[in-house]
Image: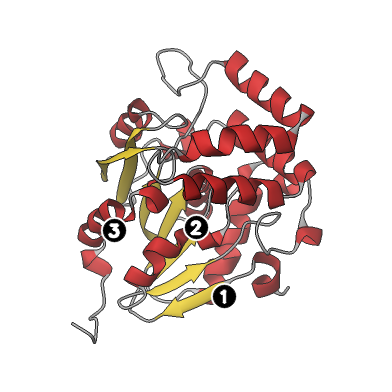
Amino acid sequence: MDLQHRNNVNVMGNGPATLVFSHGFGCDQTMWRFLTDQFAGQFRVVVYDLVGAGQSDVSAYDRDKYGTLAGYAQDLNEVIDQFASGPVVLIGHSVSAMIDVLADRQVPGRIAAHVMVGPSPCYIDSDGYVGGFTLEDIESLLDSLDDNYLGWSSNMAPVIMGAPGQPELGAELTNSFCRTDPDIAKHFARVTFMSDNRRDVAGLTTPTLILQSTDDLIAPIAVGEYLRASMPNSSLVLVDNVGHCPHMSAPGACADAMDVFLRPWKGTDAGS
């Protein structure tokens, strides 16, 4: 299997540990560009596209395999097998933070650490848990997406991005949403927003940094606090940011927090 072609895998940098960056719904690997260059001097950096997104091989999309997030986690472990070396740190945005957790659970002991950017183990409120949405909210969102994907994307992408002072980022996310095959996007959205990974994160001992925006429509602060309480070796850092993509709209603050967290796995930058 040609994983490089399937997932459009790109590798840069060098170091004793590997950082694997996984993007969120409607995005692709290019949206990590504000962070990857900063870490390539001290780490091996792997970026890739989820199947169905970006420049991945769309013909590899299988609705049964990707009917749960476990299919994406399987792909991630295959990418790690082929392209990673040394300790592996997974850096996941939004739904990919949970894909990363599932990959960790699939091969226990393999992952050295996680960085979760705007993660959510469950989007739907229930039994004292605050996910940020009611079931009716999610069903309405998915119905709107099914009815008019391009219209939904044009309206929602700028809201999801936030970053009121950087409208070009909202436009970039809109364009990314609109480039995605609508049928694949609709299926992935349903898988994403109906998933419940609370059991998967419960008790996870892998060291984890949770980066949460102070104002995020998709993943409110309560979700970050829930994750911190669920994972005994986790820490929560709030990024002063409006929107769901702080790695794009507040990359400096994200990089600073990551730099401190990643010190145990860091190489020596020849330029320093």
Q: Specify the amino acid type for callout 1.
A: Gln
Q: CA distance from mark 1 to mark 3?
A: 26 Å
The residue that disc 3 covers is 255
SS category of the residue bearing label 1: helix
SS category of the residue bearing label 2: helix
The residue that disc 1 covers is 82
The location of residue 40, given as percent across then percent down, is 37, 75
Residue farthest to the bottom, as pictured: 270
The residue that disc 2 covers is 31
Q: Residue at x 26, y 62 (%)?
A: 262
Q: Specify the amino acid type for callout 2.
A: Met
Please report contact status of discs 1 and 2: CB closer than 8 Å, yes or no.
no
Query: How many residues crowd mark 1 within 10 Å: few (<14), some (14–19), many (20+)?
Result: few
Quarter of the rendering occupied by the N terminus: bottom right
The location of residue 74, given as percent across then percent down, is 62, 56
Q: Residue at x 41, y 46 (%)?
A: 166
Among numbered discs 3 and 2, the one appearing first in the sequence: 2
